[in-house]
Amino acid sequence: MKKYITLVFISCAIGVAAQKKINVDSLLTATNQTINVEKNYTKALEMARLGKKLSPNYLDYHIALGRIHRFLNQKDSAAYYFNYVAEKNPRYKEAFLYKTQLCLEQKDTACAGATIRKGLQLHPKDKELEKLNVRYLELQGDDAKTLAYLEQLSKQYPDDERLKSQVLAFKLVSKSDRLSVAYNYTGFNRAGVGPWNYSSVSYIRQRPGFSLIGRYSYANRVSYGQTKSSGSLYELDAYVRMLPFSYSYFNVGTGNENFFPKLRLSYSGYINWKGGWESELGMRYNKSTNNESYSGILGMSKYIGNGFLNLRTFFRWNQKPYPSFNLSYRYYGDNRFNFWGANLGYGTSPDEREVLPQFAQRATLKSYKAGLSYSKVFFKQWIVSANTSFNRQEYFKNKFQNEYNLSVQVQYQL
């Protein structure tokens, strides 16, 4: 009789334990549903904490908690849970996947590199980790390594059309030769003024680590239906990656003295910081027959997901400062040529080629600007960009005019 009672007790205990396990599994399914579908992270957090309390060694709940804290922008807490799972069970691939994604979001190359290397060491040839490794190489700024790795993966997975598209897209932004034609129209609300026309033709040679751009620009200004003035500008631009975390921009140009600057020199140095920050320090020099100006540049940018927020200020230092400011935002698609953007600005900067003939005068006057931009890659070889802006420009002391700008640029990859 005692043996019978003992067997019944054990059977009941096993049944209760099994029921508890089923409940924990069901709760996990509901938690992931709340995260992935409902996106109610506060509710999901309560559910995941309950599951962890019921079953402390159930690592799926630790992963869920890490994901929830990541979505709630609580990065340190998210990293804690992913690290916990990786230490408890290194074969748990998801811990490395989510931890790498977290590091990439924070633009932390050291964290991303260490995590992805360990993940691939434990899970070699894992496709998800290999694709994250592409993002890590891109973040490092090593275009040659990134392209080589993408081509390797494309051969490894020949049926993956997305990888093939990535190879083509990356070649477009890292290794390409392009021709560009651009036109800018400026209209005015003041009788007898404008329109102003500005057009340019460029050749862009882009390689891993540097880009060279040769540009010819022509501008003419109309007043009362007749050309009032015109001129040409010849320029050479260079973007050079100096170190993995920094790059530089150089420009030299010359134009006919009665319109564009006789000599134009530009430089900007950029440094990439942790957390998706980027700083800019530079100068601009323009020399014409009757004027010579030096301008300094300070800029700060922040990558926010697929977005890029930039604030720049220009100031002249050989004359009165007359600072200008520009705040811009771009939201990128799958590459840097697919984006939409918006900007607000005050004052005139020496980077506005359309107004270079009047830069010395305009720099001393007030200007309030707002604009929108859009760019898209078509048929894998054509890049079409459009910009429109409004400028409330002071042309004499306390006298203002409205200016309307529309520009279009078409690039073709050779």
Image (cartoon, rainbow, N blue to C red):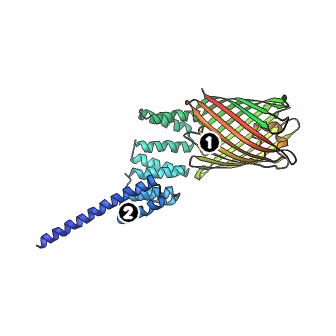
Residue at the image point whose x is 61% and y is 46% from the top: 245
Task: Please say whether residue 86 is visible from this viewpoint.
Answer: no
Task: Please say whether residue 383 is visible from this viewpoint.
Answer: yes
Q: Amino acid at mark 2?
A: Gly
Task: Give the spatial CA distance, label 1 vs label 2.
Answer: 43 Å
Q: Quadrant of residue 62?
A: bottom left
What kind of element bears circle 1?
A: strand
Q: Toward the viewer: 27 or 301?
A: 27
Number of numbered callouts drawn: 2
Q: Toward the viewer: 297 or 407?
A: 407
Residue 51 got which mark?
Answer: 2
Q: Which residue is mark 1?
A: 340
Across and down, in percent, residue 151 comes to: 48, 34
Above or below, comparing residue 142 to residue 183 in the picture = below
Q: CB atoms at circles 1 and 2 under 8 Å apart?
A: no
Residue neighbourhood size for the residue with mark 1, other residues' Cα within 10 Å, grouped as few (<14), some (14–19), many (≥20) = some
Residue at the image point whose x is 30% and y is 59% from the top: 22
Residue at the image point whose x is 86% and y is 48% from the top: 398
Q: Quadrant of residue 191?
A: top right
Residue 242 got which mark?
Answer: none
Residue neighbourhood size for the residue with mark 2, other residues' Cα within 10 Å, grouped as few (<14), some (14–19), many (≥20) = many
Q: Quadrant of residue 333?
A: top right
Select label 1 or label 2 by which is in front.
1
What kind of element bears circle 2?
A: helix
Residue at the image point whose x is 70% and y is 39% from the top: 388
**In this image, 262 relative to 208: left or right?**
right
Looking at the figure, which quarter contains the C terminus? top right
Across and down, in percent, residue 176 comes to: 59, 30
Across and down, in percent, residue 290 comes to: 89, 37
Above or below, comparing residue 215 to residue 275 in the picture = above
